[in-house]
Image: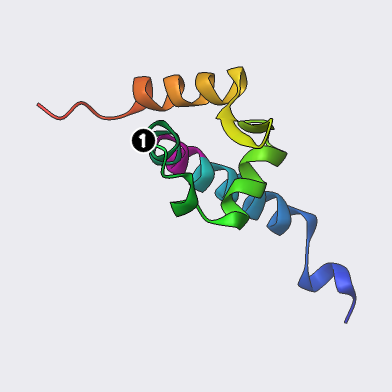
Amino acid sequence: MSKHANGSPEGSATESVDRKERLRQALPAAVELLRTRQASLIGAAEIDEFVALNWLEWHGGTLRLTVTGSNVCSQSRANAPQSR
């Protein structure tokens, strides 16, 4: 059996989309933790993923939201179902 049958590129693309969507949903909570100076509650792996996506950045030893991250949060809020 070939390696392509087990790990098709389509499967990894789907995993990447799922991972990015999971991170997109988690970003507002992470931003709130940053705002309240509780960044230590954000998982190290999650921080690494946010930084890799350019949603968060390290600045002088402090983690902060990037313009891209701010746009992702804004889009998430705009697409969130209204609770009324």
Q: Position of residue 1 (x, y in %)?
A: 88, 82
Tell me where the magenta segment starts and ends, as one range: 24-28
Residue behind mark 1? 36
Report the number of discs: 1
Q: From what the image shows, is residue 54 above or below residue 48?
A: above
Instruction: Look at the image and say whether residue 25 sits in the magenta stretch.
Output: yes
Q: Quadrant of residue 75?
A: top left
Q: Position of residue 60 (x, y in %)?
A: 69, 30
Query: Could you tell me the amino acid type at mark 1?
Result: Thr
User: Measuring 78% from the left and 62% from the top, which residue is drawn there?
Assistant: 8
User: Measuring 40% from the left and 31% from the top, which residue is drawn there?
Assistant: 35
User: Measuring 78% from the left and 67% from the top, which residue is drawn there?
Assistant: 7
SS assignment at label 1 = loop
- As drawn, the residue found furthest toward the bottom would be 1
Instruction: Look at the image and say whether residue 17 sits in the magenta stretch.
Output: no
- As drawn, the residue found furthest toward the right would be 2
Q: Is residue 69 left or right of residue 32?
A: right
